[in-house]
Image (tube, helix red, strand yellow):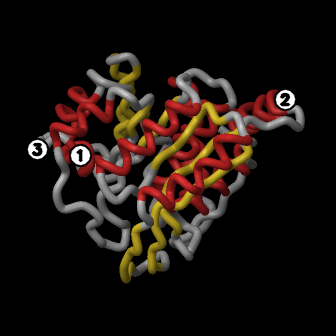
Amino acid sequence: MQQLISSIFYNISNMTNNKRPFALSIAGYDPSAGAGVLADIKTFEAIGVYGLAATTCITYQNDHSFEGVHWLSEKKIQRQLYPILKEYKVDFVKIGLIENIEILHAIIQLLYVNNSAVKIIWDPILRASAGFNFHKKIPHKKIKNILKSIHFITPNWNEAAYLLNENDAIKSSEKLSEYCNVYLKGGHNIETPATDMLWINKKLDILHPKEITAFGKHGTGCVLSSALTAYLALGYSAAKAATFAKEYTYQFLISNAQNLGYHSTV
């Protein structure tokens, strides 16, 4: 496996040649840097992509407890994005924590006005790992319209079921795949832990774990979705980008025995 990892990152080094593609994260600010835009930027940097960021909210948390959130208005988010999108060619965008569907829709519209070919990866965060619920109600009908503008959605087991008001995460993900590619994260799957499911162009593939690690990490979902974004930005196919993102996340999980992981490509 170490040989595979070395091969992946050797190829990345050759691809970048000191000129890295840009990737943009639009997500929340976590002071512990375990999740949100800070985690995304660290992931982008480690993989070999230049990370840009806009903050959607300020959270009051560490890796074990969550005390609250201060949402930024749609206007303040857009004001962060205008100079970034004006100056840099951004083809891949990861969107994380967002206050509501209306703001998500407005951001997506802005991204497409700037670049009609932009690829958006949406990590639909509904609950903090420390237990705080961000969204109690989801307008399920509006979700489908949003998905038509999404390249990849990366829900965990609970999020997938909740997005379309389903009891079954797999059935919900199949329905989601009618609109966009789906990476169903299996960390919360009791029957087959850490087994991820991938729908690309409506075709299902299974990503099995090498092993079940005993070390959980704050922000694992953020890392997975930003790693997927980074590998896509580097030009990998959706299938390879997903496989590499899972491997990167695994290395993040086993990086130490603490709740805050280390980012590395070796």
Q: Amino acid at mark 2?
A: Asn
Tag shown at residue 14: 2
Give the residue drawn at x 31%, y 35%: 146
Query: x, y percentage for residue 237?
Result: 57, 21
Classify mark 3: helix, strand or loop.
loop
Question: What residue does disc 1 label?
Answer: 191
Query: x, y percentage for residue 131?
Result: 30, 72
Give the residue drawn at x 50%, y 61%: 76
249 shown above or below 228: below
Classify mark 1: helix, strand or loop.
loop
Question: What residue does disc 3 label?
Answer: 167
User: Number of callouts in the render?
Assistant: 3
168 relative position to 253: left or right: left
Query: Does any portion of residue 155 appear in the rendered image?
Result: yes
Query: x, y percentage for residue 72?
Result: 44, 66
Closer to the chain start, of discs 2 and 3, is 2
Q: Amino acid at mark 1?
A: Glu
Give the residue drawn at x 52%, y 31%: 113
Quadrant assignment, res 105: top left
